[in-house]
Amino acid sequence: MTQTHDNTVSRKGKHLSYSECCQIAILKKEGYSNRQVAKVLGRVPQTINNEIDHGTITQLKRQTQNGNVYDTYYSVYDADAGQAFYEKQRLNCGRRPKWANTNAFIDWADDKMLNEKWSPDVVVGFARKHELFDCAIIPGTTALYQWIDRGIMRTKNMDLLEKLSRKIKAVRPGHRPNKRVLGTSIEERPKEVETRETFGHWEIDTVVGNKTKSDAVLLTLAERQTRFEVILKLNGKDT
């Protein structure tokens, strides 16, 4: 029987973030039960059960064998579907999110990013400069990235050339590599980091869900001000 080992305290009453939904999708594909997923993410099981119910979709798998075509339908949890359900529920209570009133802008922005390979920065700047839409419905660049991350747009992160082309800078000759430093305590970080006033402060975490060193783990990176998140699957926690 698969067991998970962690000391995470279960959190109640807070909606799952998009990165957590992506982690759920990966863990379910690896065969985790809902209760195991809840333990890995530090959530109560009912929260995970509800999210999976809301985000489960039916997909078609078509196979050809001996000249015959066979269609098989199966159910799978999808992070974008889960977030779409959550956003739809938000429309029914309280203030409508800004994106709910911007269908024309969203359609136009998706066309530019998918078909003409514009970056979100160019989309926002062009729309504002040429006054293509009411300024009240044009989001900022950060907000547009968040809409993409949350599945509100048809455009996905994998469609953005800017994100795919980023590379780690090589160490220049003559510069000694940094030694491993544990750094100061998170409790001692500057005020502007705590209040999210400045850009460029990242949080890093790993999600270890199974029992051996060789099992895959998830590495999550989150920029505190914009809440932009990156999730990477690693071959093991010692990678």
Image (tube, rainbow, N blue to C red):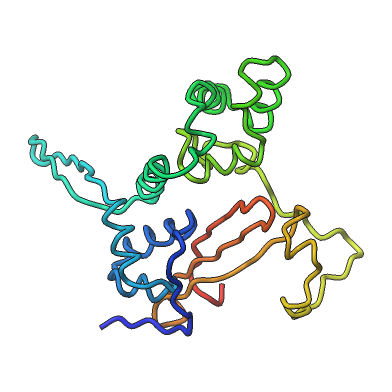
Q: Is the residue 79 above or below the residue 179 in the image?
A: above
x and y, in percent, of residue 188 in the image: 78, 77
Seen at 32% across and 61% down, the residue is: 29
Q: Is the residue 228 above or below the residue 188 in the image?
A: above
Q: Quadrant of residue 25?
A: bottom left
x and y, in percent, of residue 79 in the image: 39, 51
Q: Is the residue 140 above or below the residue 11 in the image?
A: above
Seen at 43% across and 66% down, the residue is: 13
Asked if one can make out residue 203 in the rendered structure from this viewpoint, the answer is yes
Left/right placement of residue 11 relative to residue 71 reads right
Seen at 58% across and 54% down, the residue is: 229
Q: In the rendered image, which quarter contains the C terminus?
A: bottom right
x and y, in percent, of residue 133 in the image: 61, 18
Q: Nearer the viewer, residue 45 or 155?
A: 45
- Count of marks, rendered view: 0
Left/right placement of residue 171 relative to residue 67 reads right
Left/right placement of residue 79 relative to residue 237 reads left
x and y, in percent, of residue 144 in the image: 59, 37
Q: Residue furthest right?
A: 174
Q: Quadrant of residue 6?
A: bottom left
Q: Nearer the viewer, residue 121 or 2?
A: 121
Asked if one can make out residue 32 in the rendered structure from this viewpoint, the answer is no
Q: Is the residue 75 above or below the residue 1 in the image?
A: above
Q: In the rendered image, which quarter contains the N terminus?
A: bottom left
Seen at 32% across and 71% down, the residue is: 45
